[in-house]
Amino acid sequence: MDINVTGLTKLYGAQKALDNVSFHVKTGEIVGFLGPNGAGKTTAMKIITCYLSATSGEVKVGDYTVRNNSQEVKRMIGYLPEHNPLYLDMPVIDYLEFSALLQGVEKSKVQLRIREMVKKCGLNVEKHKKIGELSKGFRQRVGLAQAMIHDPQVLILDEPTTGLDPNQIVEIRRLIRELGKEKTVILSTHILPEVEATCDRILIISKGKIVADGTSDTLRKKSQGNEMLKLKIEDGNKMDILRALQQLETVALADVIAGSENVFEVQSKGSLSSRRNVFKLCVDNKWVLTEAVPYETKLEDIFRDLTIN
């Protein structure tokens, strides 16, 4: 089920939490929603899930709008808020039954859905304990289970792996990937490797505006600009090699990496690549090219560049 967000704006007095935000999420797509604290991520997610109303703009989930059809939208969405609200005095099984009935699951299917969620979220050992007795990681699993108990077509997950250990994070990632094959998933997180491991696409929001939209590879290419290569060239004089590199028609800049022996940094011109020219240069001069590594921009660097002014 598609989600269409158009011109979404949210004002708190004179402050703009969201400023004319628009994006589209397709069925079967997992989108990572990134941004620093206070950027507007949680506000946007709360508007999509009908917890908040927008000042202007529209959100459409499938054929329904949040403004005019909030009850229908709520039935189609599973939501795990940033601060997982749980009834700590209730046993896990009772809480999931309560959540299922609250979400309108048919009574004849409630126990089946509970069993499925207990298995999927790894709650079997803890299912008879009170939620207040669980670790933070298991409480997060209970929150995920309640978000999915009614088999929603859309999942909105705000920091879904908070408090989980590395093994649990891998399991939840796998679960989200499986769910994303047939559901629409939006998740926010501050763990950038998690986004790359889980999400098909990344939205970055800063100061209430979308500042990037694309796959991690697309964002890297946009950020990198000119090709940068680290080269190790042996069996030749360092300065002779440097002068030859600087004279290549595709090379904008070339230099020796400080403190290294015959290791060079080469920046290509515009959208050109120097790799073939470098290889031919080494063959012609009987130099041995033992290393040619493109510099890869990290997602953390892209995030910082887009969100720090």
Image (cartoon, rainbow, N blue to C red):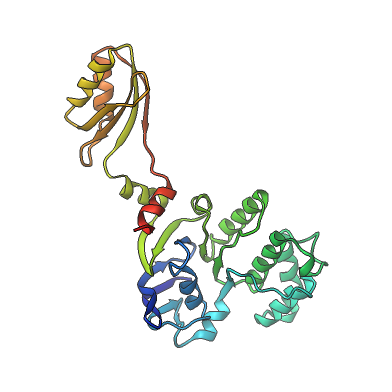
Q: Nearer the viewer, residue 263 or 128?
A: 263
Question: Which residue sits furthest bottom?
Answer: 68
Q: For the point 24% across and 21% down, which residue is it?
A: 242
Residue 21 image point, x, y percent: 36, 72
Q: For the point 46% across and 73% down, which residue is it?
A: 44
Position above or below: 187 against 96: above
Q: Please identify the quarter of the rendering in which residue 8 is found.
A: bottom left
Q: Please identify the quarter of the rendering in which residue 266 is found.
A: top left
Q: For the point 70% across and 81% down, which residue is it?
A: 101
Position above or below: 286 against 214: above
Instruction: For the C terminus, give its image quadrant.
Output: bottom left
Q: For the point 55% across and 68% down, which residue is it?
A: 155
Residue 185 image point, x, y percent: 52, 65
- Number of marks: 0
Q: Nearer the viewer, residue 183 or 138?
A: 138
Can residue 167 be seen here? The reply is yes
